Amino acid sequence: MCYASGITASLRKRISGPRTRGVDAATSIFLPSSSPPPPFPSATTYPTLILPRTQMKPWLKSKFTKARTKRKAPNLQLNTANGNLSLPSCQKSSQTKSRSSWERNGHWQCTTGKYRHPTEAHRGATEVGNTRNDALNHDAISTAASVRRKVTHSFGGNEYEGQQVYTNSNATGGFFSNAHNMTLNNSSMADYSTRIIIQGADDKASKAKKLLLEYIIPGASHDSSARVPPPQCHPGTRITINERIVSWFYDEIKQELILWISGPAGVGKSAIVQTFAAKLASAGCLGASVFFSRPNGRDNSHAVFITIAYQLAVHIESYCAFVSELLAFDPEIVNKSMEEQFKAFIVKPFVEKKIGAGGKTWGILLDGLDELDERDRQTEIVRLVTTFVRDHPNVHLVWVISSRPEPHITNTFKQQRQICDCKEEYVPIDSPQSCQDVEHYLRSSFKVIQQVKFPHIVPEGWPEETKIVKLANAASGLFAFADVAIRFIGDPDYADPTSRLDEVISMIDGCRSASTDDQPFAQLDALYTHILTRIPSRMWPTTQRVLGVIASSMLDSEIDCVKGLSVVLGLPLSKVYAAINDLYALLDTPPLVEVYQRQFRFHHASFVDFLRDPARSKKFHTSKENAVIDFNESCIRLWLDFKRKSVPGPSSEYWNRWSKYASQFHSESHPTKFNLLLFNLSHDCVFKSVEDRWSIVQREGLKYHWDKLLEILCQIDADSAHDGFNQKLFVNLWFDIWKAHREELTSRGDAREIQLQDLRLESLETFQGKIVTRIIIHGKCSYGNLGSEPTGDRTLYLKYLQKCYPELPVLICGLPGSRYGMFKFKITEDDRTNMPPGAIADSIRKSIIRNVPATIYHCFPCSDDA
């Protein structure tokens, strides 16, 4: 028997799997004439071989090592021209030169070094080699059968190094496509293909990306739809600085691996970084790009390196394999500190595992560092990156960071320069180059307005040269001013660019002359003020509310849409759009058909700075504090409106009542997600309001805040307490309030305390024969079920507690007719051992870790006489 057919038979005996049709980048084994073809059903039916990764490599390696070390065994030959593996005829051939060549070189040349080859013939259509499981030794797998692929070999790689794999387009050309110097006598050839599936590889990568995706900063990448249209350098502008940045990046002997782009607000830093990101992406060198924006909600400092890791996993195959293994081993890394995440996602893969070693340089771009939510995290990022570059200068990562020259960032870069070289590009406001670029942008934009947008309204030769020069001088190199002015002039809803331009010129003439050193944004502030003045005075309070919520980014990312804002503020969509009707130059406004998908977005962060600074915005000042108060009060009003309109019922029907109430706000066919997000938002705000009021009462002791606190507490009924809040926080908060104001709460009838032994279990609410209660252990909760036994056994748990902890304090709170009880206790080893079977659900019992202190929090609806 020929050794090749013996191998095939052995493979078939050891591995079984469903038969599949078709050849998908299949592995081919060539059988000589002396060996009859295996009895497969047909020439178009192939076996699917499924072998665990841990067993595949050693077994195949031992088999083929044995096969090629026997003297009479035919040697396997790799045709490097087409990637095919061939077997010579077992008979004597006149081509002794070729045979002797096979005998001399029969052992694969690749056995002298490690060729790593992702053997995933059964491949999805989109990803290639996403996990470590795809990276097996070429010498162990390639010898198993002929792989109709072209392989780019790599020496000195790492265990995660993926290969460039291309399906051979000539696979249908026959057995000996591109073969040469071969003679076959009386041979009968058959082509049987095997598909080797390494199970779990793509699945592991998919799970890793899905986990990262849950924690990234959404909409922060350079090509995200959330940033459409992104700021970009206008053609013909910023040519010099863009060329310097590109030349620096591709300079192989550069000393600096970090570029800091700084400059005042509105000079176009984001446009420069966006343009550079697009160039790197087109060249295949963009590792990650993160564009921060505080007013648009992209400012979560905890998610910075998670976002970078997700994009690196998408762009770099071997990195994806690494991160898949990392998250499979420790998924909690996404909840660790920024420093630990940096070590896990940057240091370990690129330094310890040497991913990308000897390859191309990847760029990591961070724009708007000063817009992250925490200043300490901003400086920590600078320190982490500069220290990494100092300690590991040979890693092929280049960092670009842009920000305003805030003192804390400037000082951090200054300190870090002592340990690490850093290239700096400062983008000034009024430099000759900036002023020239702004003027070029204005001229090009006026041409578009005249020739494209309003060709039948604007005459040729518009605008006059003097007006262009005056506008350019007013901009003084500030792109934000030029962009807002052009948007205001070219507003399609107003459709009168001539009059709009005259308004801007009049505004410039009327603006007090001020030194740009003292008031660099005087002209920009005057333009913002002029635009806001056009809003009718009766409409401004509504506009201010809308702008305050958008600028504060208080809506959860999944409900951060125009419709969500409309519902929370209690405003119909028509009124919301009327409130921002005159702000085309300042806001990106989604059409009505996209109110569930998109939110209003500021064109420039400088407008938010203007609103927040009372010295600049004056009567249009919109503070974040007032916006937060308005938002929370709006959520409470939404919750109170639900309580007013919903029909009282059992706690088990609370969610159904909420869904029915929330359905009035939308007409979507699948409203469950929107209802849930709205539910969480409103109830979280109610609890936060109680928590905040209590903090103020503790700190200041003001009666006004105590009365407000009681007003909210008295509105919380059994349904809300049981289903609406974080049980641990709510129970602890109530016990703290009770401890400090026991007498007043008792006299008002808002709360009373009993001992657990006095709790009447028959007074507790039941649903389908089970006591309705909610339990939190270590932050994990089990709804409604204390076990899976019939009604009689449902009381075992509480009876056990009454017997063992009779004096445990229980609070009975809430409104008459809608009372709820709560208590907490620390479970002991004796409880774990002595609690009767069926008294506690298996899911809860498993949550109680042996030898780890655990506090169990309870909240349950009950009758007034509980």
Image (cartoon, rainbow, N blue to C red):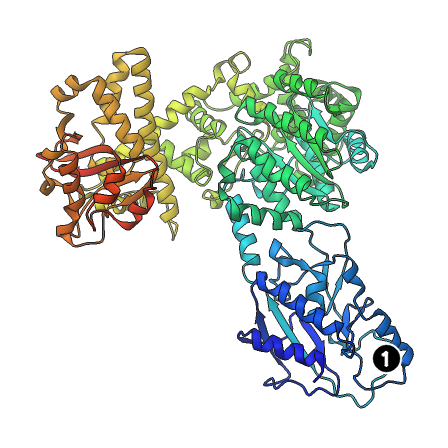
x and y, in percent, of residue 717 in the image: 20, 34
Q: Is residue 722 among the parts visible in the rendering?
A: yes
Q: Quarter holding the N terminus?
A: bottom right
Q: Position of residue 54 (x, y in %)?
A: 58, 60
Residue 196 percent coordinates (x, y): 61, 68
Q: In terms of depth relative to the viewer, which is nearer, 505 or 555?
A: 555
Which SS class for mark 1? loop
Residue occupying image coordinates x 22% and y 42%: 773
Residue at the image point whose x is 20% and y is 27% from the top = 714
Q: On the picture, is 386 further left or further right than 596?
A: right
Examine the rendered structure and indicate whether residue 278 appears above or below residue 159.
above
Q: Residue at x 74, y 18 (%)?
A: 430
Q: Amino acid at mark 1?
A: Met
Q: Residues within 10 Å of mark 1 (few under 14, many from 20)?
A: few
Q: Nearer the viewer, residue 241 or 833?
A: 833
In this view, the residue in front, 212 or 639, is: 212
Q: Quadrant of the rendered structure where residue 39 is?
A: bottom right
Residue marked by disc 1: 182
Q: Please state if 346 lies on the left or on the right of 630 as rendered.
A: right
Q: Quadrant of the C terminus?
A: top left
Horizontally, is 733 left or right of 88 in the view? Answer: left
Residue 222 visible within the image: no
Q: Residue furthest right?
A: 97
Q: What x and y, as percent, mark residue 19?
A: 55, 77
Vertical order, 330 against 624 (above or below): below
Quadrant position of residue 543: top left
Left or right of residue 116: residue 861: left
